[in-house]
Image (tube, rainbow, N blue to C red):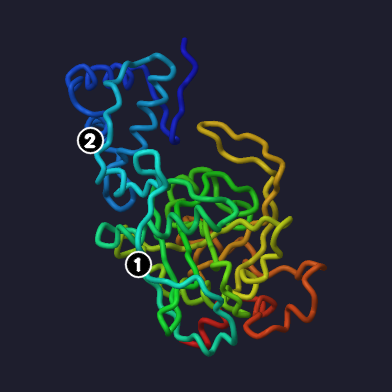
Amino acid sequence: MRKPIIIRDRTISDSDIELIRTLVEKNKHKSRWHISKLLAQEWQWFQPNGRLKDRACRDILTFLQRQRLITLPPLRELHKHTRLRSGQLKNDGQQLKIDFDFNPAAIEGKLNAYLPLSFKMVCHSALRDLETLWNQLIADYHYLGYNNLVGSHLKYLVYTANGDMVAALGWGSAVWKLKPRDKAIGWSIHQRKQHLHKVANNYRFLILPWVKIPCLASHILSQNIRILNDDWNQRYNYSLSLLETFVDGSRFKGTCYRAANWIYVGQTKGFAKKGNSFQYHGQPKEVFLYPLSRHFRKELGVNSNILPPLRHSAMRDDLSFNEANKPGFTAVLGSPFYRLRKES
């Protein structure tokens, strides 16, 4: 008896494999993209926003082919416009160059001189060039570089009142397993499976290297969070309840997240997901959470009456008293809703 195959949290049975073989045989002159759509329809497998889980089906098809359980049609060469739409940074082997309107000259001074900030969401077809610019900025200036995104995501470019570009942010799907987060939420495996889509990950945050404005990063986070849920709801037809992010403690102190009222909940063990398994990379990350609702646990399917409130823990020793008292630092207030309630 074959060992159960579990991909994308779906158990693939022998009957599923036979169904896939039949679909492939009937559509052997079609693309893999087309077959993945048909498979999602056959399974009635939908995302929370009602769209087909065809990307997950493509992952399953690819895995089954690697295991030599099915034989897919050959990959087709993508057209130029398709490469650009998918946000690739390469075009015919050359780095993609586009014209954009910003001047990489020093931007420095007091925060008030550059307010109000404006946020431009760039992950849709009408702003294809700006999304390519976002990709290029992250590839060039973020220490983690650029990776093509899978699943729900939003990308923002941030501008000053004068129209100068100062930052880029990216939000995407939450990681599947994260012990400090899961412990803080208090949910079961089943609850996580049902509600994980309501958690978003701040997977990239870049202040452009020529920008030197104190307190800018925490201000950007606070302002972006105010509009994030509306934009997410408009694009994906559901609301978020919680945000998460990782901070590399060997590089950063996480000051801007603490100043923006994010809550430190622990460290990772230094593993990263690679395909269908986890590999040890030896670089633990600090985990921060930001609840978007006072009743976020209830929205995530958890009985919050039996769990303590999610509060800020004591600041780390290496975060000095002077840093904590900089303008905008509010991480020791005890509740991430105090400030929002006061300003609303």
Q: Residues within 10 Å of mark 2 (few under 14, many from 20)?
A: some
In the picture as drawn, the residue positioned furthest to the right comes out as 317
Do tag 1 and tag 2 residues touch (Cβ < 8 Å)?
Answer: no
Determine the residue positioned at 70% across, 48% down. Answer: 284
Q: Eyeballing the image, is 117 above or below 201?
A: below
Q: Residues within 10 Å of mark 1 (few under 14, many from 20)?
A: some
Q: Position of residue 174 (x, y in %)?
A: 49, 51
Q: Eyeballing the image, is 114 above or below 299?
A: below
| Residue type of the residue flagged with mark 2 | Gln
Label 1 or label 2, whichever comes before in sequence order: 2
Determine the residue positioned at 33% across, 64% down. Answer: 233
From the viewer's perspective, tell me whether residue 337 is left or right of residue 264.
left
| Visible residue check, residue 100 | yes
Determine the residue positioned at 76% across, 70% down. Answer: 314
- Under tag 1, what secondary structure? helix
From the viewer's perspective, tell me whether residue 115 is left or right of residue 44.
right
Q: CA distance from mark 1 to mark 2?
A: 27 Å
Q: Position of residue 163 (x, y in %)?
A: 40, 79
- Under tag 2, what secondary structure? helix
Q: Report which quarter residue 125 is drawn in.
A: bottom left
From the viewer's perspective, tell me whether residue 152 is left or right of residue 25.
right
Seen from the viewer's position, the closer of residues 118 and 183 is 118
Q: Label 2: which residue? A: 41
| Residue type of the residue flagged with mark 1 | Asp
Q: Label 1: which residue? A: 231
Q: Eyeballing the image, is 295 above or below 6?
A: below
| Visible residue check, residue 191 | no
Q: Report which quarter residue 288 is drawn in.
A: bottom right
Seen from the viewer's position, the closer of residues 215 and 63 is 215
Q: Position of residue 290 (x, y in %)?
A: 55, 66
Q: Position of residue 37 (x, y in %)?
A: 24, 35
